[in-house]
Amino acid sequence: MDITGLVDLFFNGAVAQTYLPDLLRGAWITIYLSLAIVIAGLVFGLALALIRLVSNKAVVWFLRLFVDCFRAVPPLSVVLLLYFGLPSVGINLSAPWVLWLTLSLILAAFAEEIFWAGISAVGPGQWEASRSTGMTNAQTLRYVVLPQAMRLCIPPLTNRALAISKNTALGTAIGMPELLNEAQTALSFSGNATPLIMAAILYLIIFMPLMALAGSLEKRMAWGART
Amino acid sequence: MSQSIAQPMLDIHALYKSFNSVNVLNNINLRVMPGELVFLIGPSGSGKSTLLRCCNRLEEPSDGAIIVDGINITAVATDINKMRQRIGMVFQQFNLYPHMTAEQNVMLALQRVQKKSATEAREIAHRELTRVGLGARLTHYPSQLSGGQQQRVAIARALSLGPKVMLLDEPTSALDPQLVGEILQAMMDMKKEGMTMLVVSHEMRFAREAADRVAFMEAGQIVEIGTPAEILARGPESRACQFLSHGH
């Protein structure tokens, strides 16, 4: 195959122009779904870690069971189970809701472990120093422990949030018109691979800034580091 | 002097503490008068730090009472967070908040516990940090300070809340030898200003020179107590004397 044929197949201007609106619509769905997943997953994950901090052994056992299950199961199996299984018990969730719920729970499970590790890494001396000045446990957590834990948590949380957001592409398995699904549809209609290249580029445009944001957060929180 | 009618600032009465049925403190009785500097000495594992940590309930006593400035801090009805503002504590490892500057370390409890405005808290922080000789290090982070400077920030953090008594748990043990002097100086300054202090330390020379009384602990009990001169006069058959006369 000569080079013009290759360009025609992968970088076809006419095809790109035809399907760009569809792909942008798909990209928009990917963006807001990803944001909703990251927000819900992190909030729920932090909540679980805080519950674990104040709970007795029995509660912690259930919490860890939940966390381990959602960390172990492949996201696609949960998506399929919720989408095709729940209707048989009378619960009908639309595709975006299934995807949001699944990925939020999975992210929460990972985030809980990360937050917990971060909180545990702040030594007992910090709690004692703060409590010795009359601060309550809640104040100590908020002003002394969590700010230090966050610095440790941000790199692994970013990795995990990005990895799980990218799973919005699983929506294609349950017919949700997110970015990859739109690209596949366009591929079938046009018989041309250009839409897939466009989707890849759009994924880069969506997720690269997030990585940069995480990097700058890490830098900003490197308090008092000698340069 | 009205010393005879004065109330003790810190009154430890029949105090017991056990961890998993091991008695770490065994019927401790100790009265520290206002302005007094009392040293707790003794071999490791004798319960010195545990006793100190019971005095602001970082450790919960198993039995007995601790009365600070007339208030029983071990009583259920006592608001321990309120009392802890009157009981300053300094730790061996400084325990400064690493994500905050020196002044923020001092300001935190002033703002969050004593509900002072940022301006007022900053003024107090500057005053206390200047008093321990760190007026030029206000915006330094702990990682940018020497061990001695960090410990002085910790002292300023405790003093800023206006405590009636200071508990110092091996305040110089984590310091390089050449930095010990500045902490001992800070302790002397506190003493001159009339602060009541209970100190766990291995600085025997300082104990001999500056302590009003020395309490010698062994196996969870105070087995000897007296002024440094009294204890040194007891001669080599006294364990406390052996301890106090050795070391630097």
Image: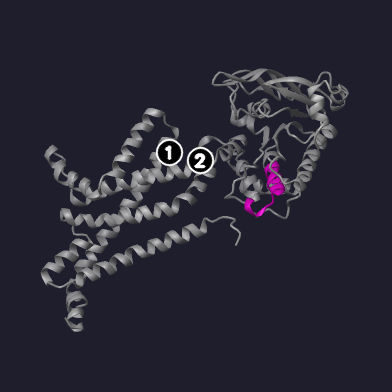
Q: Is mark 1 on a helix, strand or loop?
A: helix
Q: Is residue A143 above or below residue A173?
A: above
Foreground of the two, B72 or A213: A213
- What residue lies at 27% left-to-right and 55% top-to-bottom? A167
* Amino acid carrying mark 2 in the image: Leu
- Left or right, A221 with reference to B198: left
Q: What stretch is highlighted in magenta?
A: B141-156
Q: Which residue is drawn at 76% across and 24% down?
A: B215
Q: Are marks 2 and 1 in contact (CB under 8 Å)?
A: yes
Answer with mark 2 or mark 1, whichever residue precedes in sequence.
1
- B126 relative to A135 in the view: left or right: right
Q: Does the magenta stretch include residue B151?
A: yes
Left or right of A17 in this view: B198: right
Work out whether residue A182 or residue A122 is closer to the camera in this orientation and state it: A122
Residue B186 on image: x %, y %? 77, 42
For mark 2, what is the residue?
A141
Disc 2 sits on a residue from what chain?
A
Name the quadrant of the C terminus of chain A. bottom right
Tell me the quarter of the image containing the N terminus of chain A: bottom left
Q: Choose top left, top right, bottom left or bottom right for residue A22.
A: bottom left
Most common SS among magenta residues = helix
Name the residue tied to disc 1.
A50
Task: Tell me: residue B135, above or below residue B59.
Answer: below
Left or right: B241 in relation to B65:
right
User: What colouring does the structure picture have?
Assistant: one colour
Q: Residues within 10 Å of mark 1 (few under 14, many from 20)?
A: some
Which amino acid type is marked by label 1?
A: Leu
User: Could you say where residue B35 lies in the image, as x and y percent from the top left?
Assistant: 79, 30
